[in-house]
Image (cartoon, helix red, strand yellow):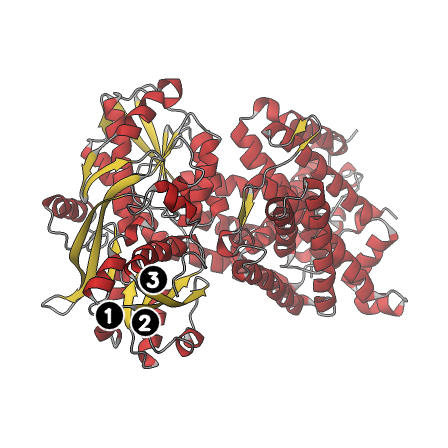
């Protein structure tokens, strides 16, 4: 008997049914994952830039938990391209999109696909914190291409070990906290707070930025709670929350934030809330119920403010609404960040008249000194190619019709990456982590 | 001779030449992102094919074992600054050891229960990696792992790395092929088909299963070492539920009963994930559809499909009578040869 003929697998019925079931699940989740794109027709299958077009790769999350944010990011890029009439000189701007699922490995593969296979000239992205570090590392291996950040907010992407060809015209998660520590200490009068945050690089940046100011003012952070992303049960956090505190600084996103706030109210928590950049954004504020009273007056800060009266911002919002009737009521910080970075790329291209020869040397030169006005004020880069721009402190307020929104209370102008502290001193403080900084 | 037989002899040579010459004509992107990625994913899927196809154990723990090796390698070389060979040896030992533990927990169950227990084991590793601070660095994971330079061989060079991964893949593939023909491999297949009978014949069924699972853990660990070098980093996102299911999808797409299927499935999967997104935002739907089609109509996967096509062509070219002569490699049902094999014929085989 020939042994090679013995490999007949018994097809077990349950296994086959299971396979079919899983296939169905895959289909369902895939269908639920992506919001429909408007505009369309931007993907291209052709390889290599021809002489009369410039390819811009857009890397964002079009699948997974951040799919909705990724769609809004793409809207931001489209707005920037539309502003230039889709052209630089006589060269057509072609967008090539690639999706990540917010994991670093996938982000890097997607970046490699855009650069090496689709031959994009410039890459804009990625969306989330840890992805940024991965793409930054990849950028180092492609010194002849220009990389611009999307909305990724991990501070170390540009502060420590930066890539010479990676530019961030959007600000980072630490900068987004500028002004908040001062505001809650001086204006709201909170002296002792506890911290509750998700346990990864972006909240580290946020907590670090908040505490840098708050501790300097004399405030105390008496306890920190770090929870995994996607935590649904906060009872242990709530029960071990110190009682002698004025407020809890909460850096949670989306459903995590809603879950915590609801449970805290249900358990009868009395402390006030201070929000991270995404803790009380529109997705959270639009939920109804007991939450309503509790989030009124919650201060937070970030790169945008919904009701910013600045005409440039109002114009940006109008433009967004008219281009994307199916978008959010107001552009998210993802749309804003991708818009700013894409616009920087296009302005740079305009200045060099589309000249990408010699490893895009001229474009790099122009970008590093580029200054321009964004919908949220002027932006320029520091020597690490990270943005210096305005940050907005907001407080949750109620409109006459009863809906909640973030009311602008303070604009902090020209925030740099080290929050005004001299860079050598700032770097001595070490990278932000679970235990750093500390002021119990 | 029969064209089919000639094809069967020539095919491995053609494939070998193609794989060897691949970096000479393909772009770096294809060598790295399609070539290398398919090969190391294929190795992980190979361990699953071995367990599922030859041991009757559909394991969802293979990606966790892959991650165990990757994490041990990354922790030792980055956090503790150990040389790469220490990391590799410890990584493989780690995944093998973990496989023994997992096997002890799960081998006495079968079918859906085995699947669920290995899924629980996989999620245990995932959540540990996601929440541990001391070793795995939580959600961010460990960055900055680079392939080493071994004497004159700089593995960070894409072409060199490709050839290294290719050699490892071929060795594991041949090793597996050899193994399933040894008495151990045959006993394992006997256990797959009828554990009670094998038990009464005097075989120690749990011991065989534990040995098979351990070996598969070692193979998955090889994939993990290569994978962490390829990615330059490892984080919980590399071993989450999506990645766990991906390897199962790869194995089923290629054909759960063929070792070649692991690699064919990996190439197919890598191509779809890389290129379907150029045409549609809903590339997961494309993968899901391909998976459904294969699971519905080609239970032997792409390899089974191609084998049937070869059989069909040999029959039409050499006439009905002679068509029976070449030994049908996989399908005794269609080898009886009185009617042309159809897709539905394959379905009958399993019943």
Kindly identify which residue carries mark 1: A295
- Does residue B290 appear left or right of residue B193 in this picture? left
Q: CA distance from mark 1 to mark 3?
A: 14 Å
Same chain check for tags 1 and 3: yes
Residue A143 placed where, x, y %? 44, 27
- Does residue A55 appear left or right of residue A406 in this picture? right
The reply to whether discs 2 and 1 touch (Cβ–Cβ < 8 Å) is yes
Please tell me which residue lies in front, A381 or A227: A381
User: Dot 3 falls on which chain?
Assistant: A
Kindly identify which residue carries mark 2: A261
Label 1 element class:
helix
Crowd rating for badge 1 (residues with CA inside 10 Å; few <14, some 14–19, many 20+): many
Residue A226 visible: yes
Residue A97 placed where, x, y %? 37, 39
Kindly identify which residue carries mark 3: A254
Residue B43 location, quadrant: top right
């Amino acid at each position: 008997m020939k042994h090679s003929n013995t490999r007949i697998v018994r097809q077990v019925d349950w296994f086959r049914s299971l396979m079919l079931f899983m296939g169905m699940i895959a289909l369902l989740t895939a269908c639920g994952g992506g919001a429909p794109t408007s505009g369309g027709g931007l993907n291209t299958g052709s390889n290599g830039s021809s002489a009369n077009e410039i390819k811009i790769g857009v890397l964002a999350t079009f699948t997974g938990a951040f799919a909705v944010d990724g769609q809004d990011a793409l809207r931001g890029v489209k707005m920037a391209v539309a502003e230039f009439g889709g052209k630089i000189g006589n060269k057509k701007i072609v967008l090539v999109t690639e999706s990540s699922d917010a994991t670093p490995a996938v982000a890097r593969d997607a970046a490699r696909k855009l650069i090496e296979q689709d031959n994009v000239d410039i890459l804009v992205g990625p969306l989330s914190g840890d992805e940024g570090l991965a793409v930054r590392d990849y950028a180092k291996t492609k010194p002849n291409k220009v990389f611009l950040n999307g909305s990724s907010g991990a501070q170390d992407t540009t502060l420590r070990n930066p890539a010479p060809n990676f530019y961030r015209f959007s600000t980072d998660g630490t900068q987004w906290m500028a002004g908040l520590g001062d505001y809650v200490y001086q204006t709201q009068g909170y002296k002792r707070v506890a911290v509750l945050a998700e346990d990864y690089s972006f909240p580290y940046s946020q907590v670090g930025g908040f505490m840098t100011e708050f501790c300097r003012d004399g405030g105390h952070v008496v306890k920190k709670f770090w929870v995994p992303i996607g935590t649904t049960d906060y009872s242990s956090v709530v029960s071990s929350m110190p009682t002698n505190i004025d407020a809890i600084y909460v850096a949670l996103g989306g459903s995590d934030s809603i879950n915590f706030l609801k449970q805290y109210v249900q358990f009868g928590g009395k402390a006030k809330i201070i929000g991270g950049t995404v803790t009380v954004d529109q997705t959270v504020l639009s939920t109804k119920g007991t939450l309503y009273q509790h989030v009124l007056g919650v201060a937070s800060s970030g790169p945008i403010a919904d009701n910013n009266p600045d005409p440039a911002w109002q114009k940006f919002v109008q433009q967004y609404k008219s281009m994307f009737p199916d978008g959010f009521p107001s552009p998210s910080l993802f749309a804003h960040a991708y818009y700013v970075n894409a616009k920087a790329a296009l302005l740079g291209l305009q200045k060099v008249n589309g000249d990408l020869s010699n490893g895009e040397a001229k474009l790099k030169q122009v970008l590093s000194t580029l200054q321009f006005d964004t919908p949220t004020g002027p932006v320029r880069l520091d020597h690490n190619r990270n943005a210096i721009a305005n940050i907005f402190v907001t407080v949750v307020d109620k409109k006459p019709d009863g809906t909640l929104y973030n009311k602008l209370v303070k604009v902090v102008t020209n925030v740099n990456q080290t929050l005004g502290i001299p860079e050598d001193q700032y770097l001595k403080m070490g990278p932000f982590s679970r235990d750093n900084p500390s002021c119990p | 001779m029969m064209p089919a037989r000639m094809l069967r002899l020539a095919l491995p040579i053609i494939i070998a030449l193609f794989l060897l010459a691949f970096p000479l004509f393909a772009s770096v992107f294809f060598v790295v992102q399609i070539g290398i990625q398919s090969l190391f994913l294929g190795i992980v899927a190979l361990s699953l094919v071995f367990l599922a196809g030859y041991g009757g154990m559909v394991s969802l723990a293979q990606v966790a074992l892959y991650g165990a090796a990757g994490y041990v390698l990354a922790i030792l070389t980055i956090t503790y600054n150990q040389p790469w060979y220490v990391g590799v040896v410890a990584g493989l030992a780690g995944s093998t050891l973990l496989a023994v533990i997992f096997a002890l927990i799960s081998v006495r169950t079968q079918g859906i229960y085995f699947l669920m227990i290995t899924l629980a084991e996989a999620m245990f590793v995932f959540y540990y990696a996601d929440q541990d601070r001391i070793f795995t660095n939580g959600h961010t994971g460990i960055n900055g792992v680079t392939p080493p330079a071994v004497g004159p061989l700089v593995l960070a060079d894409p072409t060199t790395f490709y050839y290294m991964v290719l050699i490892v893949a071929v060795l594991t593939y041949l090793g597996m092929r050899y193994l399933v023909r040894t008495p151990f491999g045959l006993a394992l297949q006997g256990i797959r088909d009828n554990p009670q009978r094998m038990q009464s014949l005097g075989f120690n069924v749990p011991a065989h299963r534990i040995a098979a699972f351990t070996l598969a853990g070692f193979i998955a660990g090889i994939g993990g070492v290569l994978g962490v070098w390829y990615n330059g980093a490892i984080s919980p996102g590399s071993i989450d539920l999506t990645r766990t299911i991906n390897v199962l999808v790869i194995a089923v797409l290629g054909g759960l009963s063929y070792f070649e299927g692991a690699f064919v499935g990996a190439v197919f999967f890598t191509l779809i994930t890389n290129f379907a997104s150029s045409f549609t935002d809903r590339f997961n739907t494309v993968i899901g559809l391909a998976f459904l089609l294969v699971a519905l109509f080609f239970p032997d996967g792409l390899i089974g499909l191609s084998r049937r096509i070869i059989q069909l062509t040999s029959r039409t070219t050499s006439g009905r009578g002679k068509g029976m002569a070449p030994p049908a490699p996989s399908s005794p049902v269609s080898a009886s040869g009185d009617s042309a094999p159809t897709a539905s014929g394959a379905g009958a085989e399993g019943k």
